[in-house]
Image (spheres, grey):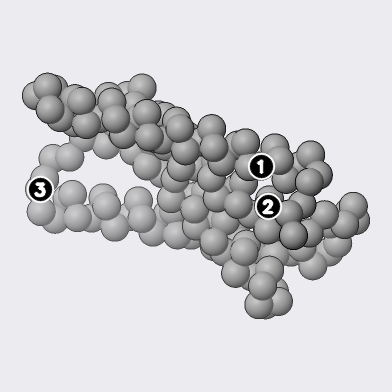
Amino acid sequence: MFRKDKGYLLSLGTIGICSVIVIFGLFVMRQNISDGNPIYDRGALFAVTFGLSLLPVTFYNMSKPKTGIVADERTKRIAEKAGLYALIILMGCILVLSLINSLLQLNVNFSLMGFVLPLIGIYSWSILIYYLGRTGDV
């Protein structure tokens, strides 16, 4: 019922560590809100984004069967296609956010965009590679 290989146990440990990091970051953010400080703290924001960006990669690693076979041409094309679509999604998000900022004249500071954009890219890539691998559409 349960797999007992080292890779699976390492993935379970990674999920546990990432969950603790995310919970710690959220706790620090909550403390900042209750103390009247700014909502974000760069260390806490980094902890949350790091934990949330490592979780989909770990779940994807756990879902793949361990056959020991090197990736074939089909899986390479799936990864390339998912990477292209993730780049297009990322560029679209930047474009939409910039248009909203300029049209509504919000004067938003984009200094935290370095934390948000990797999350968008990693999550869109992992969802697309999982979807394209399941449907067989290449």
Distance from the alpha carbon under mark 2 to that under mark 3: 45 Å
Is label 2 in contact with label 3 (beta carbons under 8 Å)?
no
**Quick one: 108 or 65, which is closer to the camera?**
65
Q: Which mark is residue 11?
A: 1
**Quick one: 86 or 21, which is closer to the camera?**
21
Q: Position of residue 91 (x, y in %)?
A: 42, 54
Residue 109 appears in view: yes
Between label 1 and label 3, give the one nearer the viewer. Answer: 1
Name above or below for residue 89 compared with residue 98: below
Is label 1 in contact with label 2 (beta carbons under 8 Å)?
yes
Between label 2 and label 3, give the one nearer the viewer. Answer: 2
**Quick one: 12 or 103, which is closer to the camera?**
12
Secondary structure at badge 3 equals: loop
Is label 1 in contact with label 3 (beta carbons under 8 Å)?
no
Tell me which residue sits at (86%, 62%) in the image: 72
Distance from the alpha carbon under mark 1 to that under mark 2: 7 Å
**Quick one: 10 or 69, which is closer to the camera?**
10
Q: Position of residue 85 (x, y in %)?
A: 54, 62
Image quarter for residue 125? bottom right
For label 2, the residue is 62
Image quarter for residue 108? top left
Name above or below for residue 111 compared with residue 54: above
Tell me which residue sits at (77%, 52%) in the image: 3
Secondary structure at badge 2 equals: helix
Distance from the alpha carbon under mark 1 to that under mark 3: 45 Å
Q: Which mark is residue 105?
A: 3
Name above or below for residue 107 compared with residue 35: below
Residue 45 appears in view: no
Could you tell whether 23 is left or right of 82 in the image?
left
Q: Earlier in the sequence, mark 2 or mark 3?
A: 2
- Amino acid marked by disc 1: Ser
In the current view of this chain or complex, which residue is farthest to the right?
69
